[in-house]
Image: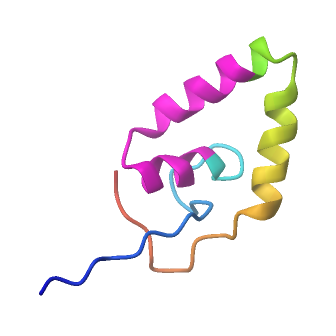
Amino acid sequence: IMAKKIKHLYRCQKNRILGGVCTGIAEYFEVDPVIIRLIWVIATIFSMGIGLVAYLIAYIIMPEEPAGDHKNL
């Protein structure tokens, strides 16, 4: 019987540009962080800035990744 690893959504401590939100989301969904960043920027432009508010909310809500728990993408 294989134990299923539980995924957690964290703000990443490494490879982050601002607060680690996009990198944390990318690690959770196992995609390149650049893709998440591009989607976020495009969404922000087309939503007239709502993406910035969403980023701030995500930064506040998402806990920071525990030390030593980082995965390399």
Residue 26 percent across, percent down from the top left: 47, 46
| Magenta region includes residue 54 | no
Against 47, residue 67 (above or below) is below
Residue 53 percent across, percent down from the top left: 87, 38
Magenta residues: mostly which secondary structure?
A: helix
| Magenta region includes residue 25 | yes
Residue 24 percent across, percent down from the top left: 55, 55
> In the figure, is residue 4 to the left or right of 56?
left
| Residue found at x 32% / y 76% | 5
| Scheme by which the image is coloured | rainbow
| Residue found at x 76% / y 22% | 44
> In the figure, is residue 55 to the left or right of 48?
left
Asked which quadrant contains residue 40, the reply is top right
Range covered by the magenta-colored residues: 22-43
| Residue found at x 70% / y 63% | 62
Against 20, residue 41 (above or below) is above
Q: Quadrant of the N terminus?
A: bottom left
Residue furthest top in the image: 46
Against 57, residue 35 (above or below) is above
> In the figure, is residue 14 to the left or right of 3?
right
> In the figure, is residue 55 to the left or right of 67?
right
Q: How many marks?
A: 0
Asked which quadrant contains residue 17, the reply is top right
Against 32, residue 25 (above or below) is below
